[in-house]
Amino acid sequence: MPKQSEPSGPTDAANPFETAKRQVDIVADLLHLDNGMREILKHPKRELSVNFPVRMDDGSYRVFNGYRVQYNMARGPTKGGIRYHPNVSLDEVRALAAWMTWKCAVVNLPYGGAKGGIICDPKHMSKGELERLTRRYASEISLIIGPEIDIPAPDVYTDSQTMAWIMDTYSMQQGYSVPGVVTGKPIALGGSEGRAEATGRGCAYVIREAAPHAGIRIKNGTVAVQGFGNAGSVTANLLHDEQGAQIVAVSDSKGGIYKADGMNPHAIEEHKKKTGSVVGFPGAKAISNEELLEIKTDVLVPAALENQITKKNADRIQAKIVAEAANGPTLPEADSVLFEKKVTVLPDILANAGGVTVSYFEWAQDIQRYFWELAEVNRRLERVMVDSYAQVHKIAESNHVHNRTAAYMLALQRVADAIRLRGIYP
């Protein structure tokens, strides 16, 4: 099979939006989209840049810069997180909004994609400063957000408390409570059961569906997880508890551990709570994050940082399934190597889409003012992930491409179809 150009996550540190646009061109060629449609798919619909003052704890004022980009609304209101980070840039937010568009489309949610961010260093800000920053930013972008327009969510260095502040600020401006303006809220304010573990649970469902096609059995199969945070630990727990897998290796930012006959992930969680790291878990051998990627295992779950599997180490990957719980852990040139090695890659826009799927469920519950039990949330999430994997796998098989290209083909076709059917107004 000849090597092919493949869409992936953020790979161009200087300009991630150029990467996002190249991905559109690659898949547009395979879908035979005309130049007009390509241009529409490569441009955000709307972007807002705001500069606003915030009173700091010492009484001084600082002006912060923030963004909100709504990439495409052809399939419905836009959806996407808000991040607080010193390196936020408009092109980064544009790229993330594009990737959210494709992620929502691949799991067939009635959403377009959006993203937001503020250039700040939240690690050096008090809770009061973060609240005033959040409320002022929410006020500035309130012109273009709302449950029928654009629904923000947590992202890097934002959380359920951040969403509560945004929901309250927007609601006070409207004069009544509007819980559906954001997702990822505390349950007491209209958040959804199952949202916290949704990314890991969705990943576990996709791994289960892919296993027969990859020629492995999850029961008594081996699993390595790079990044034992929320997504990684939930994926490990579910594969261990519900599917009978052996968790042979896990890691965090301080290092990794390995035990050939498996470890109890719940015990690892307790150890991490007590010590601050998985390192030093009793009976396990210490390994590096780099070594973890290359051990012989049935399933590898990169759940940490981007750009972990590269052209340099792709040929040494021994896993039969690579399930991307993190965003962008595999570089495009590594995709080609893994494809030739017949490694099944479950791409991020499919494998970690459980989070945005349950965010959609939260929004739907808020709109109806009717909330579901946890079992109902998980049942609906399972159906979405199972159906989405089946569609991606079918496209991959029929077009002789790997799953990442297939997922992008499915997503872009859905968005292009919506644009075409709606037409251009006026």
Image: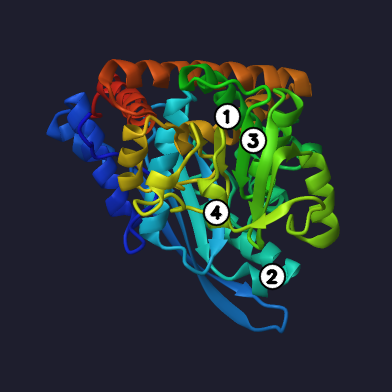
Q: Nearer the viewer, mark 4 or mark 2?
A: 4
Q: Residue at position x 21%, y 39% from top? A: 25
Q: Earlier in the sequence, mark 3 or mark 2?
A: 2
Q: Which mark is residue 291?
A: 4
Q: Closest to the observer: 249 or 41?
A: 249
Query: Going by the image, does 127 lie left or right of 351?
Result: right
Q: Closest to the observer: 350 or 242?
A: 242
Q: Residue at position x 53%, y 75% from top? A: 63
Report whether residue 76 is seen: no
User: Distance of mark 4 from mark 2, alpha carbons?
Assistant: 41 Å
Q: Earlier in the sequence, mark 1 or mark 4?
A: 4
- The residue where tag 2 is placed is 129
Q: Nearer the viewer, mark 1 or mark 4?
A: 4
- The residue where tag 3 is placed is 200
Query: Which amino acid lies under the numbered mark 4 shown in the image of this protein?
Result: Glu
User: Distance of mark 2 from mark 1, alpha carbons?
Assistant: 31 Å
